[in-house]
Amino acid sequence: MPKNPDASRTPVTVVGLGLMGQALAGAFLRAGHPTTVWNRTPQKADQLVADGAQLADSVASAVTASRLVVLCVTDYDAVHGLLDPLGDVLDGRVLVNLTSGTSQAARETAEWAARWQDTVYLDGAIMASPAAIGTADALILYSGPKPAFDRYESALASLGAGKTYLGADHGLSSLYDVALLGLMWSVLNGFLQGAALLGTAGVEAATFAPFAQQGLGTVGDWLSGYARQIDEGSYPALDATIGTHLAAMEHLVHESEALGVNAELPRLVKALGDQAVADGRGDDGYAALIELFRKPAGRST
Ligand code: NAP
C-alpha cells in the first residue's frame, strides 16, 4: 500500500467509510491519489490512515480538502444530513454520490446541488462488492454532466475498470441499478424455484446448477431480438406464442402445488400470461408482456 501519494494524481475526498466507502478510499490510495477521508465513526478510518489517507476532523474540512468529493453512505437522507449544513463550502466541488437510492432522489439531489453555480453533481451506482472495487470486475455506473465525468474519468477508473457513463439524466444510474437488481432477483428466484421442485425428487441443487446455467445462456441470447421488438412495439411470435407459454406456465403451477413447494411465483408468472391472453395477445411473442410491465399491476391493455 503506497504511503506517499503521487502529487500528480487528482486529490480526492471520500465521505462515508462503511464497508463500501473503505473499499473506495483504499482503491484511490492504491492508485496513488492524495486521499482525504471522513466518517461519522472515525475509528473506521484507522487502516486507511495507516495506509496514507488524511483523516479530516469534520465533513466541512473533508469537502474543502479536494475538489473531487466521493460520497458513499447508507442513503440519500444521510447524504443530505451531512451536506445540507455546509452551504457555500460546497461551491466549486465535484460531488460524486455513489450512495444507493432512487432515480427521484438522484434528480432531486442534482437540483439541490444546482443552487451553487460552480458545484457539479454526478450520481452513481455501484454494481460490485467491496472486494471487487479497484479491479476489472467492478462495474460502476455514472450519470450527470458528461464534461465532469470526462474530466474525472481517469481518477474514477481507480475504483474499477468497468466505469460506465449512462447519460445526462441524473436518475439513470439508479434506474439501471434497480433494473439490474430486479433481473438478478428474478433469475435467482427462478433458480430457487427449480431447485425446490427438483429437490422433491432427491435431485441436489448442485446437479441442477449446470442445467440452469445453460438455460440462462440460451435465454440471454434471446434478449437482443426481444429488445428490438419492444423498441419497435411489434411482437411477432418467431419462436413460441404466449398461448404456448401459458400452457407450460400452468404445468409449473400444478407441479408446484402438487409437490407442496411454494407456488406464489409460478402463479404470478401464469397471471401475467392469463392477462396477456385476455388482452388478445395469445398469438404474439413473449415480448408482448412488456405492455403489462409498463403499467401498474391489474390494468389491462
Ligand atoms: P455500511 O457498511 O452500513 O456503511 C454505511 C455508512 O454510512 C457508514 O460510513 C455510516 O457511518 C454512514 N452513515 C449512515 N448514516 C449516516 C448518517 N446519518 N450520518 C453520517 N454517516 C452515516 O454500508 P456500505 O456497505 O458501505 O454501503 C454504503 C452504500 O453503498 C449504500 O448506499 C449501499 O447500498 C451501497 N452499496 C454497497 C454495496 C456493498 O456490497 N456493501 C454494494 C453496492 C452498493 P458510521 O460508520 O458512522 O455508521
Image (cartoon, rainbow, N blue to C red):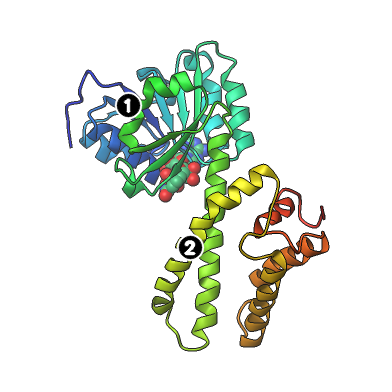
**Amino acid type at image mark 1:** Ser
Q: Position of residue 218 (x, y in %)?
A: 48, 63
Rendering quadrant holding ligand 1:
top left
- Type of the residue with mark 2: Thr
Q: Position of residue 125 (x, y in %)?
A: 48, 39
Q: Which mark is residue 280?
A: none
Q: Earlier in the sequence, mark 2 or mark 1?
A: 1
Left or right of 49 in this view: 66 = right
- Between 75 and 49, the residue placed more toward the observer is 75
Task: State the SS at label 2.
Answer: helix
Q: Residue at x 55, y 68 (%)?
A: 190
Which residue is depicted at the point 30% across and 43% down?
136
Q: Which of label 2 and label 1 is nearer to you?
A: 2
Q: Residue at x 82, y 63 (%)?
A: 278
Q: Which mark is residue 154?
A: 1
Residue at the limit of the structure toward the top, as seen here: 117
Describe residue 223's horizontal placement relative to residue 38 as left or right. Answer: right
Q: Closest to the observer: 139 or 131?
A: 139
Left or right position of 251 against 204: right
Q: Which residue is mark 2?
A: 218
Pick the front one: 248 or 142 = 248
Viewer can see residue 149: yes
Picture quadrant where residue 109 is located? top right
| Residue in view at x 53 percent, y 44 percent | 177
* Quadrant the N terminus occupies: top left
